[in-house]
């Protein structure tokens, strides 16, 4: 592939300049807690894209973070690829970092293995692909922006075969609250045959991966109320309703041993045969410090819904424990829902399920009359975040993306039918084209935490990937 050969020759020749440009971007704070940083990122990215011949602009909805969008024109009649990444990052407390988060630092390996600081290379100096770039946003997700710039540099003004439209967001880390509105406003300018969502890490084995979907999400909290005040367990334990016991029994009856919901009225969809076959081919998660459960593997389970108990609070334990019937108990749940399950419908099903188990539902702490009339009282509050999305691995619209990934990586990618986690990928359905996630960051990049880093090899892969897509 000529475009890929050109990309590799270019980055091997001017690798130090690519790293210097990336370091300049990483030195601009990219968290919402640092005023002006997001705006400066957007302007820097727009200017650098335009300098490389792309049509690029910054737009901003009132009250929202800015967004960079634009286009690289290819040959008439060629395909159009969409490319999404984000340039905002998680907060970074400098005291927790080995190197300052917005002073990009180059090391010859991971910190955990004694990686030492190395000077930034100058023109003509060699670049080791095993080096790591430590800075907030290096892996999540400004490396994807740097890869786009590097791939355009490698073109050196030559017109690519494929057109590319790009959307670079400035508020992904706060939940993308304005992305749907941006997509509606820009829909005509963002038409593409398929979208590449460049975020997340490669497979833990180091192999490239393409992810065809994500689960949707809903949050639910259930509070069960008992006596108006803690009661002596010896005196009243056989008599008073115990909210901790009632709640644990209730939650235990809402999921099976693997976390699949057993909620009244919730129909668990069966994965397609194609998705199950793809899941069976994905390598396992490695050693997580506990035995794997019997039955289907992790990736098949991630095609099914999950009701996770992320916390239960009631009374006290340990030295603070008291011999009482506690006055209330609360469980915090997150539900992960594959397409086509509706988060709104599932939250309502939880409410109906709790009511069907004999609980009188309230909107807040019950008053005296309510407590006198009902032994089982509960409040259910839910937030249906967003639905899941999945593209079938055999979708012909993404065949070219798979070819580009394999060409850029030099090996066949791991095809993941769905992440178990949740990302608001469904917003892209408004653009009417399938979307897949193609990560470029190393799996051990400390995403969202201190000492976030990107392996130089990941940046090189990202540049080659976009070059292959353009070609």
Image (spheres, helix red, strand yellow):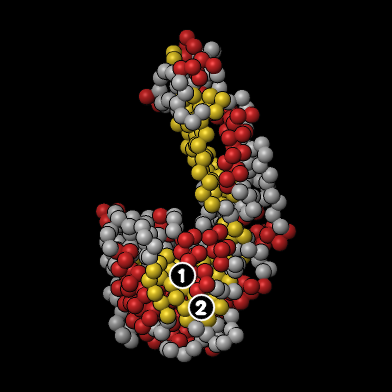
Quadrant of image for the N terminus: bottom right
Of residues 468 and 370, the one nearer the viewer is 370
Residue 88: name its quadrant.
bottom left
Residue 104 x/y as whole percent: 30, 68
State left or right for residue 148 relative to residue 39.
right
Q: Would residue 307 be visible to someone looking at this image?
A: no
From mark 2 to mark 1, how far is it between C-alphas? 10 Å
Q: Residue furthest right?
A: 273
Disc 2 vs disc 1: Cβ atoms closer than 8 Å?
A: no
Q: State the SS at label 1.
A: strand
Residue shown at the point (52%, 34%) measured from the top left: 380
Left or right, 371 with reference to 133: right
Q: Residue at x 57, y 41 (%)?
A: 347
Can residue 67 be seen by looking at this rendering? yes
Mark 1 nearby-residue class (10 Å; few <14, some 14–19, many ≥20):
many
Is residue 20 placed above or below 325 in the rendered structure? Answer: below
Dot label at residue 45: none
Work out which quarter of the rendered image holds the C terminus and state it: bottom right
Is 455 or 140 nearer to us in this picture?
A: 140
The residue at which mark 1 appears reads as: 167
Q: Secondary structure at mark 2?
A: strand
- The image shows residue 34, relative to residue 320, as above or below, that is below
Residue at label 2?
164
Residue 162, image x and y in percent? Answer: 55, 82
- Asked whether 471 or 124 is in front, the reply is 471
Q: Position of residue 362 (x, y in %)?
A: 51, 28
Relative horizontal placement of residue 226, taking residue 215 as reference (left or right): left
């Amino acid at each position: 592939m000529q475009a890929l050969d050109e990309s590799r020759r270019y980055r091997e020749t001017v690798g130090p300049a690519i790293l210097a440009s990336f370091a300049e971007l990483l030195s601009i704070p990219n968290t919402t807690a640092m005023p002006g940083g997001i705006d400066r990122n957007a302007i820097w990215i727009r200017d650098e894209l335009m300098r490389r011949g792309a049509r690029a602009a910054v737009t901003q909805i009132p009250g929202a973070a800015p967004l960079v969008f634009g286009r690289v024109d290819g040959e008439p009649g060629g395909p159009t690829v969409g490319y999404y990444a984000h340039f905002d990052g998680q907060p970074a407390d400098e005291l927790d970092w080995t190197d300052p988060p917005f002073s990009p630092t180059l090391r010859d390996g991971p910190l955990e293995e004694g990686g030492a600081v190395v000077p930034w290379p100058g023109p003509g100096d060699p670049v080791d692909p095993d080096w790591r770039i430590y800075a907030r946003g290096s892996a999540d997700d400004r490396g994807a922006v740097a890869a786009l710039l590097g791939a355009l540099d490698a073109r050196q003004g030559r017109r690519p075969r494929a057109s590319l439209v790009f959307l670079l967001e400035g508020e992904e880390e706060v939940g993308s609250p304005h992305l749907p509105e941006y997509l509606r406003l820009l829909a005509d300018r963002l038409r593409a045959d398929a979208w590449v969502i460049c975020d997340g890490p490669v497979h833990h084995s180091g192999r490239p991966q393409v992810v065809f979907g994500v689960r949707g999400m809903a949050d639910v909290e259930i509070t069960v109320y008992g006596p108006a005040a803690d009661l002596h367990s010896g005196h009243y334990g056989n008599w008073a309703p115990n909210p901790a016991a009632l709640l644990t029994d209730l939650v235990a009856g809402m999921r099976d041993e693997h976390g699949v919901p057993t909620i009244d009225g919730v129909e668990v969809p069966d994965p397609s045969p194609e998705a199950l076959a793809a899941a069976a081919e994905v390598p396992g998660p490695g050693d997580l410090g506990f035995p794997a459960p019997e039955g289907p593997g992790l990736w098949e389970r991630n095609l099914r819904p999950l009701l996770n108990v992320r916390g239960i609070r009631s009374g006290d334990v340990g030295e603070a424990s008291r011999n009482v019937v506690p006055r209330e108990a609360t469980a915090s749940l997150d539900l992960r829902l594959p397409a086509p399950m509706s988060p709104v419908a599932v939250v309502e099903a939880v409410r109906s399920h709790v009511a069907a188990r004999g609980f009188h539902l309230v909107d807040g702490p019950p008053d005296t009359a309510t407590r006198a009339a009902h032994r089982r009282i509960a409040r259910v509050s839910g937030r249906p975040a967003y639905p899941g999305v999945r593209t079938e691995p055999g979708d012909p619209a993404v065949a070219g993306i798979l070819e580009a990934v394999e060409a850029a990586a030099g090996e066949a990618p791991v095809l993941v039918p769905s992440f178990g986690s949740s990302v608001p990928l469904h917003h892209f359905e408004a653009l009417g084209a399938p979307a897949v996630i193609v990560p470029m960051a190393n799996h051990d990049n400390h995403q969202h935490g201190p000492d976030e880093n990107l392996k130089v090899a990941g940046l090189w892969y990202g540049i080659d990937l976009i070059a292959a897509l353009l070609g």
